[in-house]
Amino acid sequence: MTRTWHFVALVVALGVMLAAAAPASACRPRTSVANVEDEVMCLVCGVPLSLATDSPQAGRERALIARLAAACWTKQRIKSELVAEYGTAVLAAPPGNGFGASTWLVPLGGLAALGAGLVTATGARRRRESLEQRRSTA
Amino acid sequence: MLTFARACLTLALLTAGWGVYASMRAARSREERWAASGRRALYAVAALLVTDFALLESAFVRSDFSVAVVARHASTTTPPFYRATAIWSSQEGSLLLWAMLLALWSTLAVRLAARRLPRATPWATATLLSVALFFVALSVFWANPFQLLDPAPPEGAGLEPLLRHPAMMFHPPLLYSGYTMSIVPFAFAVGALIARQVDVRWTHVVRRFALGGWMLLGLGMLLGSRWSWTELGWGGYWAWDPVENAALMPWLTATAFVHSTILFQRRGLLKAWTVGLAIATGVLALLGTFLVRSGLLTSIHAFGASTLGAPFVAFIALVLVASTLLMLARTGDLAPEHRLRSLWSREGLLVANNVLLVGLCLVVLWGTFFPVISEAVTGSKASVGPPWFERYTVPLAIAVVAVSGLASLMAWQSGTRHGTWRTIFVPLLAALAVTTALAALPGVTSSPPSLALFGAAAFVIVASTGQLVRAVRTRRLATRERTPLALTRVIQRNRRRYGGYLVHVGVAVLLIGVAASSGFERVRDVRLGMGQHARVGGYEISYRRATGTLSREKVALGAVLDVTRQGHHVTTLQPTRGYYPNLDVSAGPISRFFNGESTSAIGLRPSLGSDLWAAIQPDIHPLQPLMSDADKRFLVASPNVQALVVAGLVARYEDKPPPAVFRVIVAPLVEWIWLGGIVAIAGGVIAIWPSGLAALLLRLPARLRPYLRRFRPATS
């Protein structure tokens, strides 16, 4: 019985050692440089990273993204890391808080106002005309 | 030559000023002689600017480096084709081109309009000349293209490597033509307001200019996108860059204007809105021109920071404020003659589409300027890139496509429910069938916006072609003509309508290409050594061998990639990276050939199904010890010897290439974008084609006879 338990312990220990020795890239990458670079900016060039083919800053950002993607980080986690490294200006869309929220709210408000104006104007005219018609027949 | 050219430019400035005065005097006094003087001033400005442009172009072609702008943008090693186009790669040359094109289009517009709008045309002429005056003043005082360099350098700096592409010949002139043609409706809207002639007549005069500006802006953007896809190394065709948006915004309002004039002319609706759109398009054209050269917003397209920002801002602000005050002052004249009765009618849906297009323009405007606004308010510049723009523009684009298709099927005023259902049934069925069939394909549902756009596009294509088919069938029943003749006659009798349907079809096909390529493309970055391979999107890419070439212009290092699918050879791609010499000799006599500007030449296999695209980033680090050694050994060697050394390094790379990084893209239906664009432009040409043009051309010799008689020798 003791020999059996020793054998099991040995197998488990071997298994743990093999798992620990397995290369980090045994994980399946969940994103890629190409997937992330459309959503981040090259800080020095001021253009989306996908457009900045030659800049050294762009090279540094891409190298960081490539390293984190190879370590199977998700896109969101990589972007958070980039923000921690370079600040929110590295994102290609402003954050949804503070003044950055206005990027999202102003267009929505504007479109809603345009649509409401159109519907209201058409409805108001129809109500006015219907009222005028009733008055003229009365 | 320079003295004469500067004199012409100064004379153009003074003549434009005189023309503004004469036209305004004509407008107030209604005296034809002042109006004629104003018009002649405009023609003279056009002639002077054409002369100046020709002189500057000849300086570029001859590589006359005594002209400062030529020395900065051309060189003896620049191929002749690119030397000719280098004129508009410079701030000075592009401003001159802009002013010249404005003067030419204005000349045509004023000649056509003078008799049809006798009260509004002098005001429009004054407005056009005021804009021309501004641009000529920029050339004279801020960005003079005829500055002398004394002594003249023996060699120029050369053309920016990224601009060495055949599209460079057409892309800027097309965009500038689009911008300048958009100023014509603006000027006549202003003229109609001041003269209190805001009935439909001014829209008839400017319709073709608005449509022409729309077409040329669209063609310019299409060409630029194609250039980006086929030439640049980033693997895309639209980046929501500020300069790209600068052309898109007036294009959107011009689209709205073209549709608005239909409602105004046919139904007397949207009078104020139509005037407002013409003014907005003109202001946005000026704004777009400003964005490219102000340095206000970071862009890969821009000329860079300059001193032109302040005068441009002042001029645009003046134009905007004056136009707004004018519209407010003429509120009474802008009161609508008729009212929209129902949203569920062709009128109602066209109005809704107008609102969507203007909404789209406002979204793009807000996103483009938000970095500047955020810096002004918070002190730090926020970034707004593709993810933000796509969040808004994709649903709006789907709505625009769907509503435009629906509008073309609806009856004018209010249709019956049964009639409406009958007309939309087949296109709706087609849209549902396409959406369902595509949704069944693997992976398609991963991009719901793309699927929605496919359905909306199918609706538009079936709706538009259905209208044409019905019209041809009706004509054939009545006349017994064969189908091709019946089709020609149907289109000839109503070019505007059927040209418009063709535009709708073209835009729908273009958006199918955009939806497919952006929703379903496969991108992979791989590091491959020679003989290695990788899989991308169902294709196997194998790195066969390295390539290296040396020319007068550059060193190009690349690769030959074999592409197979399921064991069958598909194509061979040959991406390269070009290295232009660094003009700074302290960078090393040999190293400078590898550490100057570099550009990518793409390996591309286009097809109607999917494009295969590859770019290479060679690893030249292993060559650097050899370069550093050669820099020391050949420091004082002759250029021929240095060239031999560089050739040796290139051969070394070819022989023993280190692994290189490749970006490989498989993008479905990209070619549909260009095809759809061409179809849309063709539709625009049909819509713009003047009726009776062929008859006019045949009559022309008879009309010229009285003039030709003067040159006949006298007979004894």
Image (cartoon, coloured by chain):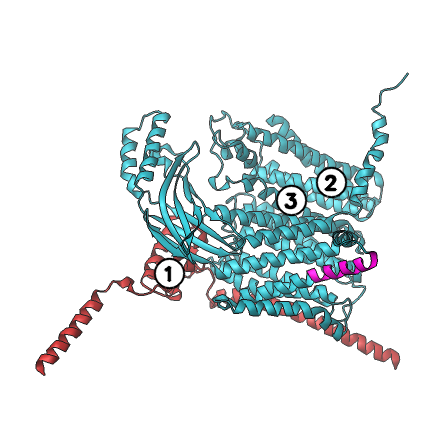
**Can you give x and y, in whole percent of width and height, for residue B170 in the image?**
59, 42
Q: Which chain is cyan?
A: B
SS under mark 3: helix
SS under mark 1: helix
Q: Quadrant of residue B552?
A: top left
Taking B491 as reference, is B267 above or below it? Answer: below
Q: Residue at x 66, y 63 (%)?
A: B462
Residue at the spot of label 3: B177
Q: Residue furthest right?
A: B716
Looking at the picture, tell me which residue is in the foreground, B603 or B518: B603
Q: Report in which chain the residue with disc 1 lies.
A: A
Q: Quadrant of residue B94?
A: top right
Tell which tag, 3 or 1, sits nearer the viewer.
3
Report the magenta residues as a range.
B465-479
Spatial CA span between label 3 and label 2: 14 Å
Q: Amino acid at mark 3?
A: Ser
* Quarter in which the C terminus of chain B is drawn: top right
**Can you give x and y, in whole percent of width and height, for residue B358 in the image?**
64, 61
Q: Residue at x 53, y 64 (%)?
A: B391
**Can you give x and y, in whole percent of width and height, for residue B504 in the image?**
66, 58
Residue at the spot of label 2: B107
* Quarter in which the N terminus of chain B is drawn: top right
Taking B101 as reference, is B71 above or below it? Answer: above
Residue at the spot of label 1: A82
Q: Report in which chain the residue with disc 2 lies.
A: B
Which class describes the residues within 10 Å of circle 3: few (<14), some (14-19), or many (20+)? many
B381 lies left or right of B340: left
**Does residue B193 appear in the picture of this structure?**
no
Q: Amino acid at mark 2?
A: Thr
B536 lies left or right of A111: left
